[in-house]
């Protein structure tokens, strides 16, 4: 699996490179600036991009803007944001087109290698890997949106855990409910978000994107 990595801090960039290589990833490029990231994404077309939001030259939002620009030219390019801060605007823009794997992790809340590597693999496969704090900020912002109003409190809990990337069994363990109850809640979520069994793409991911993006209409399938 080929990765383009963008991180301006040398030690962290080297550490992430070594960590991913140990777990079988190929680092197609490891860059430190926004322009270099965009160039690497367009030339390498990796399986997944791992991107810091703030990169030189101005250390504001170059990383995210480069990833979004590349995603417009490579629809569905999987992007995992690794940042120190919750940037609601950036997260919402990343989710806006409803296609491709997406993730947003906070650096100080990645507690072990397995957690990080699992998130990279999940996003590369087209899934989601959202930190609970990011989810909370997005849901607070979107509290009045139509999709949220259609869901029960329990369904919101289930979908929030889906956004983190939890499996049905993991959701059941977190909420202390049976796998059957989880499956029933998920079926209800699909129905309320009007995601039919014949829908193209992964209904689970589409439901998460609709939920986090707060759009009144479900996202287009990818």
Image (cartoon, helix red, strand yellow):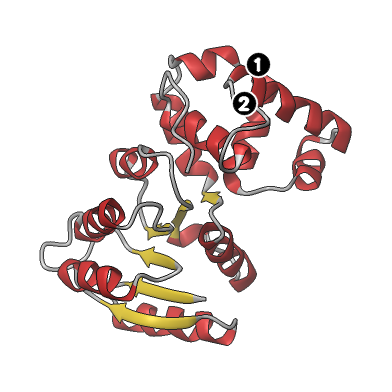
**Residue, x 47% and y 26% (percent of image)?**
218
Q: Is residue 129 visible?
A: yes
At numbered mark 2, what does the secondary structure look like: helix, strand or loop?
A: helix
Residue 54 placement: quadrant: bottom left
Residue 200 placement: quadrant: top right
Q: Is residue 137 above or below residue 112?
A: above
Q: Is residue 132 above or below residue 153?
A: below
**Residue, x 32% and y 80% (percent of image)?**
30
Image side of residue 9 versus residue 177, left or right: left
Q: Position of residue 171 (x, y in %)?
A: 75, 41
Q: Is residue 145 above or below residue 179?
A: above
Residue located farthest toward the left when viewing the structure as drawn: 57
Residue annotated with mark 2: 156
Residue 183 placement: quadrant: top right
Q: Are marks 1 and 2 in contact (CB under 8 Å)?
A: yes
Q: Position of residue 75 (x, y in %)?
A: 35, 52
Neighbor class of circle 2 (other Cα within 10 Å; few <14, some 14-19, many 20+) is some
Q: Is residue 8 visible?
A: no
Image side of residue 149 versus residue 39, left or right: right
**47 or 179: nearer the viewer:** 47
- Residue 13's tag is none
Q: Is residue 209 above or below residue 36?
A: above
**198 or 106: nearer the viewer:** 198
At numbered mark 1, what does the secondary structure look like: helix, strand or loop?
A: loop
**146 or 1: nearer the viewer:** 1
Image side of residue 190 versus residue 96, left or right: right
Residue annotated with mark 1: 152
Q: Position of residue 81 (x, y in %)?
A: 39, 57
Q: How far apart in space, not on screen, are marks 1 and 2 (Cα)?
A: 6 Å
């Amino acid at each position: 699996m080929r990765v383009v990595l963008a991180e301006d801090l040398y030690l962290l960039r080297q550490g992430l490179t070594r960590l991913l290589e140990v777990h079988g990833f190929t680092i197609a490029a490891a860059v430190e600036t926004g322009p270099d990231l965009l160039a690497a994404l367009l030339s390498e077309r990796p399986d997944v991009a791992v991107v810091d939001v703030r990169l030189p030259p101005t250390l504001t939002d170059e990383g995210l803007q480069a990833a979004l620009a590349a995603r417009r030219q490579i629809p569905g390019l999987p992007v995992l944001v690794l940042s120190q801060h919750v940037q609601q605007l950036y997260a919402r823009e990343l989710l806006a087109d409803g296609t491709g794997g997406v993730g947003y992790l906070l650096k100080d809340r990645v507690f072990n290698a397995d957690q990080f590597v699992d998130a990279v693999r999940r996003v590369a496969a087209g899934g989601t890997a959202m930190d609970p704090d990011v989810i909370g900020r997005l849901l607070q912002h979107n509290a009045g949106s139509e999709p949220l109003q259609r869901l029960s409190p329990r369904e919101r809990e289930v979908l929030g855990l889906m956004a983190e990337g939890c499996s049905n069994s993991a959701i059941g363990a977190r909420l202390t409910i049976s796998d059957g109850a989880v499956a029933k809640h998920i079926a209800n979520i699909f129905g309320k978000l009007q995601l039919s069994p014949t829908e193209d793409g992964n209904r689970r991911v589409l439901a998460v994107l609709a939920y986090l993006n707060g759009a009144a209409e479900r996202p287009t399938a990818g």
